[in-house]
């Protein structure tokens, strides 16, 4: 991490600053949760991206503390290949360098995939159970019973139920996490929200749209590569390739008459314009590179 600090006289001596890993199986809402934890006031700082590419750092600062969130890829147990092995390695690496872990599960749904992540949880760090999608519970009693069931699986330091999608009980979750941060000055400027580059975030936005529109199966057989990123006055020109294994996957992403890819591209461009606060020209196309997910050298080329 960057070793500069940004202390100033406004921060009291009991100011806390530390790293929080957000972990869980795929599709439990980890990224949505982090977006609410850091708020929607997005700005990009120019710091160099961390070496492990898919750990997105989100930063939230208030009067008493600075939370530096590490968002990991969902732990993969279903599809075994070099890509998912690397993603799983990123999860364990993220856990090795933090102060507290937020373990996210879906309300009323606890599976073997969740238990696989629990087996990775560090015993020497505080782990907070975060039950997301609380609207899935029919009653408060049913939700409380579910939380108690999950708590029996691990020695959690605390638990909180939230709705990441609706931004509910986010403040309560921060309050549970705060005491586990060490005392210290902030490591990032107060207005920092992420330490990722604009190029990286552009790829993440396209990846998120692929997940949203194509369901669980295809995105794990696809990667997103920024082939060109140009900044002009008042305009970003971004060229992104989606890499897949097979022609059939390419056809699924493009969709009938190109409609699916057009929708993915349009939604991604609008999100980028909101994030970068500038006009964006975005070109997205699909390329077939057979077997890329099993090609460890290829993964290294893309910083995976």
Image (tube, rainbow, N blue to C red):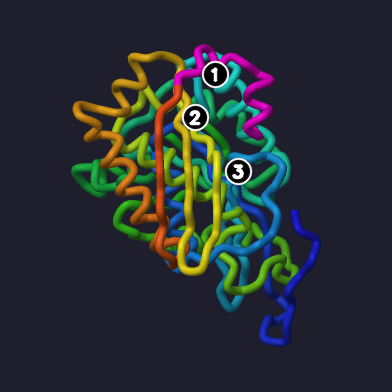
State the image coordinates of residue 53 (x, y, percent, origin top left): 63, 40
Gap in Å between the C-alphas at discs 3 and 2? 16 Å
Task: Judge whether residue 53 can be spotted in this image.
Answer: yes
Q: Nearer the viewer, residue 299 or 63?
A: 299
Left or right relative to 129: residue 69: right
Tag 1 secondary structure = helix
Residue 69 drawn at (x, y percent): 58, 53
Q: Quadrant of residue 168?
A: bottom left
- CB of mark 1 within 8 Å of CB of mark 2? yes
Which mark lies nearer to you, 1 or 3? Answer: 1
Give the magenta range: 288-304
Q: Secondary structure at mark 3?
A: loop
Residue 241 in the figure: left or right of residue 186: left
Q: Residue at x 51, y 41 (%)?
A: 103
Any magenta on residue 181?
no
On residue 14, the disc is: none
Quadrant for the C terminus, please.
top right
Disc assigned to residue 293 = 1
**Residue drawn 51% across and 18% down?**
289
Dot 3: few (<14), some (14–19), or many (≥20) neighbours within 10 Å? many
Q: Which picture quadrant has residue 212?
A: top left
Numbered label tally: 3
Q: Are marks 3 and 2 in contact (CB under 8 Å)?
A: no
Q: Report which residue position mark 3 lands on.
A: 55
| Residue in view at x 73 percent, y 82 percent | 8
- Of the numbered discs 1 and 3, the one sitting upstream in the chain is 3
In the rendered image, which residue does mark 2 sit on?
Answer: 223
Residue 113 placed where, x, y %?
45, 23
């Amino acid at each position: 991490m960057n070793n500069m600090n940004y202390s100033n006289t406004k921060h009291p001596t009991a100011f806390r600053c530390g790293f929080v890993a957000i972990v869980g199986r795929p599709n439990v809402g980890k990224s949505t949760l982090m977006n609410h934890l850091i708020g929607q006031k997005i700005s990009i700082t120019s710091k160099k991206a961390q070496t492990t590419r898919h750990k997105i750092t989100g930063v939230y600062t208030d009067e008493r503390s600075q939370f530096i969130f590490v968002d990991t890829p969902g732990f993969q147990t279903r599809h075994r290949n070099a890509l998912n092995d690397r993603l799983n390695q990123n999860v364990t690496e993220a856990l090795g360098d933090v102060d507290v872990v937020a373990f996210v599960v879906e309300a009323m749904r606890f599976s073997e995939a969740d238990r696989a992540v629990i087996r990775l949880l560090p015993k020497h760090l505080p782990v907070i159970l975060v039950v997301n999608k609380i609207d899935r519970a029919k009653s408060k009693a049913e939700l409380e019973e579910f939380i108690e069931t999950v708590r029996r699986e691990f020695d959690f330091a605390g638990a909180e139920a939230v709705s990441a999608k609706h931004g509910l009980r986010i403040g309560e979750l921060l309050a549970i996490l705060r005491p586990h941060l060490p005392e210290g000055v902030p490591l990032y400027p107060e207005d920092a929200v992420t330490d990722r580059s604009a190029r990286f975030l552009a790829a993440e936005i396209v990846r998120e749209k692929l997940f949203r529109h194509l369901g669980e199966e295809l995105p794990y057989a696809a990667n997103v590569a920024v082939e060109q990123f140009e900044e002009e006055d008042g305009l970003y020109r971004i060229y992104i390739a989606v890499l897949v294994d097979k022609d059939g996957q390419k056809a699924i992403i493009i969709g009938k008459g190109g409609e699916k890819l057009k929708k993915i591209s349009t939604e991604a461009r609008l999100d980028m314009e909101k994030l970068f606060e500038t006009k964006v020209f975005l070109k997205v196309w699909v390329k077939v590179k057979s077997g890329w997910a099993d090609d460890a050298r290829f993964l290294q080329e893309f910083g995976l």
